[in-house]
Image (cartoon, rainbow, N blue to C red):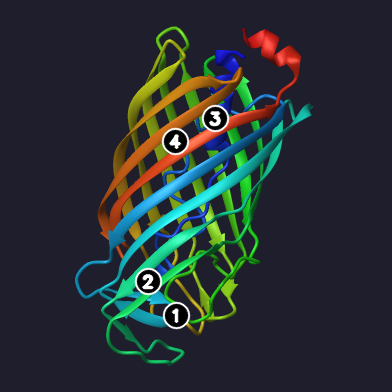
Amino acid sequence: MTVGIHRYAIALTAAMALPGAALAAERGAGFYLLGSKGPEAGITPPPGVYFQNDIWLYSGDLGGNKQLPTGGRLAAGVTGDAVLAAPSLLWVLPEEVLGGRAGIGVTIPYGWMNTDADLTLAGPRGGAVTGSVSDPIFTIGDPIVSGMIGWDAGNFHWNTGLMVNVPIGDYQDGEISNIAFHHWGVDVNAALTWLDPASGIELSGAIGMTFNAENPATDYRTGNELHFEWAALKHFERKWDLGLVGYAYDQVTGDSGEGANGPFKGRAFAVGATIGWNFEVADHPVSARIKYFHEFDVENRAEGDSVFLTIAIPLSVPKRLDVAAK
């Protein structure tokens, strides 16, 4: 295989984002996971079928006496850890759409999460519980379906996309740990990448807005969430790359619904580093990436550190594309 196909395989990381468990809003979570985009965010793979698996490790705490709306209650002294996997499939259509390449995909998250709270107080819906609470789970989350379309012009690559959270995962009403969200959600996003093959320098940025429906189990509706991710990298011999990454998050509208206890608007920033490399297994191209993020200046959400481990593999790419990329 070729380094050209390698590069597009890792671009799948930017094309599909996985659900998360450490943002703002109800129980400090949103289905769009910050940090899932960044390097090569604006690059759309060529026609073909691609598989990607993201493994996300997170550890954080709310800090102080702050309270977190979760399971229809208010939890204080919250700390959390999570190890989630999100296998994804992306099909980029062979036909051009609006002069670009269009793709559709699906992501099904699953994994382990543990949330500890020193005290769980009665929320607007009642159900007071006092004392220390610990809630470990291993389960499946809500699937996410996505669509995207992308274009290229010289060293510039850009795309726009739509992600939909489908609330059919394993949601446990009243528990303080959940991977599923039990409500519909839509994320509208766009990304731009400038990549100079001669120097190996890359600059990428991705911006999006998440819109959430009400959770019928808790009568809670998370406000609109704005997110921005960036990356600055140096590619070496098209085999590996090294650079900086970061993100910014701001909940632009407050939470609402009968289960909400005030607006609870969140904010967060993070910086980190990434390394990616391309290799072959039995003549099949494989792209791998590690990203590390440290959060700071956080309000109304958990603050911590996260690591992404990503493997991307093209399952089916037309031979003419493979030959052209050599």
Among the two numbered marks 3 and 4 on one chain, the one whose residue lies closer to the N terminus:
3
Quadrant showing the N terminus: top right
Residue located at (57% from left, 81% from top): 217
Residue 120, image x, y percentages: 33, 83
Residue located at (55% from left, 32% from top): 312
Residue type marked 2? Phe
Residue 262 can be seen in this image: yes
Q: Are marks 3 and 4 in contact (CB under 8 Å)?
A: no
Residue 182, image x, y percentages: 58, 70
Among the two numbered marks 3 and 1 on one chain, the one whose residue lies closer to the N terminus:
3
- The count of marks equals 4
Of discs 2 and 4, which sits in the foreground? 4
Q: Which residue is denoted by mark 3 in the rendering? A: 11
Of discs 3 and 1, which sits in the foreground? 3
Q: Which residue is denoted by mark 2 in the rendering? A: 264
Among the two numbered marks 3 and 2 on one chain, the one whose residue lies closer to the N terminus:
3
Q: Which residue is denoted by mark 1 in the rendering? A: 260
How far is the residue under mark 4 from the one under mark 1?
Answer: 33 Å
